[in-house]
Amino acid sequence: MLSTYEEGWLNFLPSRLRGIISGQGESRGNWREIHLRPGQPVLILGAGGETYLGQGSLPVTGAELQATLELMARHSVYALEEEMRRGFITLPGGHRLGFTGRAVLEHGRIRLIREISSLNLRLAHAVPGAGRSVIGNLIRKGRVLSTLILSPPGCGKTTMLRDLVRLFSEGLPSHGLSGQQVSLVDERSEVAGTYLGLPQLDVGPRTDILDGAPKAEGMLLMLRAMAPDILATDEIGRGEDAEAIAEAAKAGVAVLATAHAGGHREALQRPTLAAILKNNCFERLVVLDRSDGPGTVRAIYESKRDVRLEVGECCESWALCPPWSARAASAI
């Protein structure tokens, strides 16, 4: 019998592909991505590298690509035009189906992608404990510090955000932190993996989830309606996101968020992120990479003083360091 987690993606594959993948048994738990390309066997990316499936059978066909997209869009492709414009669909359980093909333009912008040429199914994974290596630097005197997690795609920032939300929601008595009221704005259903109103991934007992709402509007709604201690969201980067985060800061609410960037210098080259960082909306920056596998903590910075904090060091010891004077960062 399939778990609810697997029902979020496996049942939406055409029968032949589902059979090939179902035959892999428990090894599916280590998979990160499933690539489908016409004329090629199914390619799996996992913890141990890449593997081709079904090499002795027919390769993936164009018809199977289209059938997969239609099944995962619940036969309502045109009702998902906004998601298709962005090039991906979020599935139950927080999984993401990315696709390429022929772009249909409208006023010079992508309106739709048709004639699908490849699919990439990125599987969401909860990794309990992923945030424990950094929590000591994100709490001060019983208060969670506003934190932005930066990394390139595929380096585990959503996984770390999910676990930090869970840990802070549960409370950390060893760090003098009681359970926090967390409001999670999960625009793409990737953090909690909400399906039929229920989170499929553990985000803690005191977490309220607003699923599918635009981040900026959702953050403001949560501030007004839920009186959170912590406001959490994934992949910020628009001007309206900056305004909502500034409102949270004014209200004294800690913000946990992620953004695409290889580090703070790269983030400062993006106008919206630069505005957020220069306004000191975040007190900590956590930078991830894949140098020792996804989720490797490369560095932690104090936003007002640009000091790399070694995991486990006391944040207060850096109080007098000059602004943004970076020390060499090595994988932790």
Image: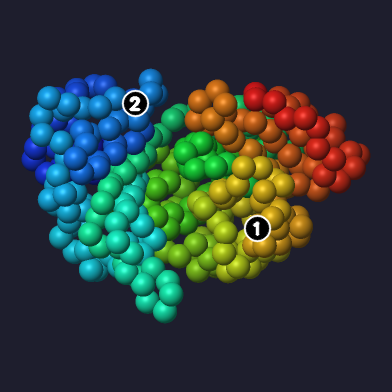
- For marks 1 and 2 on the same chain, the one whose residue lies earlier in the sequence: 2
Q: Position of residue 80 (x, y in %)?
A: 28, 65
Looking at the rendered structure, the kind of residue marked 2 is Glu
- Callout 2 environment at 10 Å: few (<14), some (14 to 19), or many (20+)? some
Measure how far apart labels 1 and 2 are at the Cα level: 33 Å
Q: Which mark is residue 270?
A: 1
Eye-nearest disc, 1 or 2: 2
Give left or right: position of 320 versus 300.
Answer: right
Looking at the rendered structure, the kind of residue marked 1 is Arg
- Which residue appears at 38% of the width and 23% of the height? 49
Q: Secondary structure at mark 1?
A: loop
Q: Secondary structure at mark 2?
A: strand
Q: Position of residue 291 (x, y in %)?
A: 57, 26
Q: Position of residue 299 (x, y in %)?
A: 68, 33
Quarter of the rendering containing residue 285: top right
Residue 194 seen in the current view:
no
- Which residue appears at 20% of the width and 33% of the height? 41
Give left or right: position of 295 versus 124.
Answer: right
Look at mark 2 in the image and give the residue it sits on.
50
Q: Position of residue 5 (x, y in %)?
A: 26, 38
| Discs 1, 2 touching: Cβ within 8 Å | no
Closer to us: 141 or 106: 106
- Which residue appears at 54% of the width and 30% of the height? 290
Total labels: the figure holds: 2
Residue 56 seen in the current view:
yes
